[in-house]
Every structure is written in structure tokens, then in C-alpha cells.
Amino acid sequence: MSWFWTSLFTRRPTRHFARLDTQGHCLAFKQCANKPEAGNWVEINEIRLAWLNRPLPANARVCPLPRNNWVQRSLTA
């Protein structure tokens, strides 16, 4: 019975996103499970209000994880 309650109340981890304008300045932040579809959203490692209306630091971006596709892994090596 405990598996029922844990599966009922488990949440997917939230990810952090920043919306950028054409110059790379941060316009907004958002926390959600999936990447927003509309707009120029990039995944970041944390939200800092000091980044608003300023260029997003390069070290703030999260690199996408490689998929389990063995062809892509072998090509990058």
C-alpha cells in the first residue's frame, strides 16, 4: 500500500529556465518539468535575480545530457 502513496505524491524534479532576448539578455525565469515551447528559453543551473536585464553568464547554462543513443556517443568520442 505504501507504493501507492509514494507513486501518487512523487513529483518530477523541476528544472530552471531563463528567457533570453536577441542580445542574450535575461528577460524572465521559469521553473517547470519540461522546457517551455514558446520563446527563447535556455536551461540554467539556478535562478539569480541579479541576471535580469543583463547578459546571462556562460557558466549558468546547463549542457544537455547525451541520450542513450550509442551512435551519438561513439561519434563524439
Image: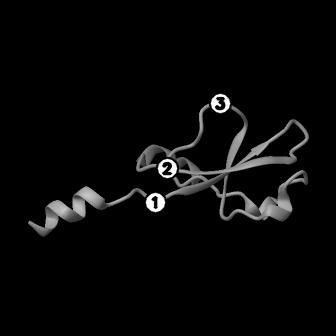
Instruction: Compare marks 2 and 1 and give the one earlier in the sequence.
Output: 1
- Which residue is the site of mark 2? 33
- Total marks drawn? 3
How many residues crowd mark 1 within 10 Å: few (<14), some (14–19), many (20+)?
Answer: few
> Residue reaching furthest bottom?
2
Q: CA distance from mark 3 to mark 1?
A: 21 Å
* Residues at marks 2 and 1, CA–CA distance in whole angstroms: 6 Å
- Is residue 33 positioned above or below 21 on the image? below
Indicate the position of residue 31 as horizontal and vertical percent values.
59, 53
Residue 16 picture location, percent across and down: 62, 56
Q: Secondary structure at mark 1?
A: loop
x, y (%) of residue 60? 74, 62
Q: Amino acid at mark 2?
A: Ala
Residue at image x 15%, y 65%? 3
Q: Quadrant of the C terminus?
A: bottom right
Q: Residue sitting at 51 percent across and 57 percent down?
A: 14
What residue sits right under mark 3 in the picture?
A: 38
Secondary-structure class at tag 2 = loop
Give the mark, 3 or 1, whose residue is nearer the N terminus.
1
The residue positioned 81% from the left and 59% from the top of the image is 58
Q: Which residue is mark 1?
A: 13
| Residue depicted at 67% across the width and 65% down the height | 46
Of the residues shown, which amino acid type is indicated by label 1? Pro
Contact between marks 2 and 1 (CB within 8 A): the answer is yes
Q: Is residue 68 shown left or right of residue 58?
A: left
